[in-house]
Image (tube, helix red, strand yellow):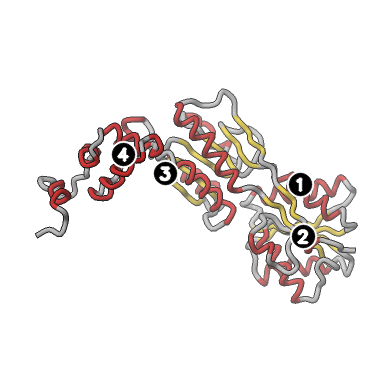
């Protein structure tokens, strides 16, 4: 005897093993039309709460799963949005992905997420792989994708670039200018009366956004007739990396200096290394980072940093794309949304002199 209720067990009678439960079966069990089930799957809020509850129960009882491939064939694209980020473990990108997922899932879309590991060749391969599944839209990180322009324009789907603003956008760019971040940090450190400056960045040969922050940092100081030593590291942080950084700082002697790091993880590592070496922060060395990670508020001293807006980036990208997807249109001209950033001044750079 089956342990299932008779009404549920009967749904399986006559179905060969491996056959999918259809939308008609769900509709019959929920006592609604198949079109109502379809509407619920696309936009749950568009269905009355009583009907939505019955449909959810029917889906759970029957084990129904959406046939995304069939939907894609019927509509020329799937209800999936492809997203490529350079790192899935980076807190910035994970927050952005969460915000995007919240917006898209509310309308029945799913994210297809891939990680390029800052490798442009891998990113190009991922683009081709995602496009083969006919996504409703594609989201890329940064604006260094001119080599893929012809391929992306041929798809006819909206393409968004996030986390960076720059030349030649596709349909949408949402983010900020990383050069301006570097300039803001340089201006802050220079305003403390410092005259020796170092910018240290990890993997800048791949992470061009970190490289642009370094360029903005150096360019602003050059306008003040000052120079910056730029240290490009192969790794994000390690004892060997920090030894290299502090050996370079030692060349400037005991004069107060400013150290700007390409991210907060590296900057917090520098705080620990400074303490280990008996270097007073901020008395002898002012340290600033980028990202405003939670640990930046807990370090001793607390870290001066730049706060981007990852959640707002995700929500803005998803909302704009969703409008174009649902209306089946593309913008007449590319749209750019500058969300800016905020300089957060804390104890690691205060009262150096």
Where residue 266 sits: x, y (%)? Answer: 68, 63
Mark 1 vs mark 4: which is more N-terminal? 4
User: Which residue is labeled 3 in the image?
Assistant: 110
Q: CA distance from mark 1 to mark 2?
A: 22 Å
Q: Quadrant of the N terminus?
A: bottom left
Q: Is residue 280 left or right of residue 297?
A: right
What distance separates the C-alpha of mark 1 from that of mark 4? 56 Å
Q: State whether residue 129 appears in this view.
A: no
Q: Secondary structure at mark 4?
A: helix
Disc 1 versus disc 2: nearer the observer: 2
Residue at numbered disc 2: 346
- Tag 1 residue: 216
Q: Earlier in the sequence, mark 2 or mark 3?
A: 3
Q: Are marks 4 and 3 in contact (CB under 8 Å)?
A: no
Name which residue lies at 82% across and 52% down: 188
Depicted 16 relative to depicted 173: above or below: below
Residue closer to the observer: 214 or 298: 298
Q: Secondary structure at mark 2?
A: loop
- Residue at 36% in and 36% down: 47
Q: Earlier in the sequence, mark 3 or mark 1?
A: 3
């Amino acid at each position: 005897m089956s342990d299932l209720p008779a009404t549920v067990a009967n749904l399986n009678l006559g179905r060969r093993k491996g056959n999918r439960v259809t939308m008609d079966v769900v509709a019959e069990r929920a006592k609604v039309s198949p079109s109502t089930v379809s509407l619920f799957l696309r936009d749950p809020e568009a269905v009355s709460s009583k009907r939505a509850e019955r449909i959810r129960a029917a889906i759970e009882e029957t084990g129904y799963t959406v046939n995304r491939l069939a939907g894609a064939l019927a509509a020329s694209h799937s209800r999936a949005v492809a997203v490529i980020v350079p790192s899935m473990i980076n807190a910035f990108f994970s927050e952005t992905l969460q915000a995007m997922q919240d917006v898209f899932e509310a309308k029945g879309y799913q994210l297809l997420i891939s990680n390029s590991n800052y490798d442009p060749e891998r990113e190009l391969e991922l683009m081709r792989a995602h496009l083969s599944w006919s996504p409703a839209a594609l989201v890329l990180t940064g604006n260094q994708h001119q080599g893929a322009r012809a391929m992306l324009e041929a798809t006819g789907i909206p393409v968004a670039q996030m986390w960076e603003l720059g030349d030649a956008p596709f349909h949408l760019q949402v983010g900020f200018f990383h050069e301006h971040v570097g300039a803001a940090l340089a201006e802050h450190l220079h305003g403390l009366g410092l005259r020796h400056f170092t910018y240290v960045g990890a993997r800048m040969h791949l992470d061009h956004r970190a490289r642009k922050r370094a360029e903005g940092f150096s360019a602003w100081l050059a306008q003040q007739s000052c120079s910056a030593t730029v240290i490009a590291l192969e790794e994000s942080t390690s004892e060997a990396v920090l030894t290299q950084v502090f050996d370079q700082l030692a060349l400037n002697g005991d004069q107060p200096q400013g150290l700007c790091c390409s991210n907060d993880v590296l900057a917090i590592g520098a705080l620990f290394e400074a303490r280990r070496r008996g270097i007073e922060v901020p008395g002898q060395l002012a340290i600033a980072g980028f990202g405003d990670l939670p640990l930046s508020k807990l370090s001793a001293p607390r870290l001066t940093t730049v706060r981007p807006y990852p959640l707002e980036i995700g929500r803005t990208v998803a909302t704009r794309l969703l409008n174009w997807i649902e209306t089946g249109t593309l913008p007449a001209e590319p749209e750019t949304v500058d969300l800016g950033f905020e300089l957060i001044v804390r104890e690691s750079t205060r009262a150096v002199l």
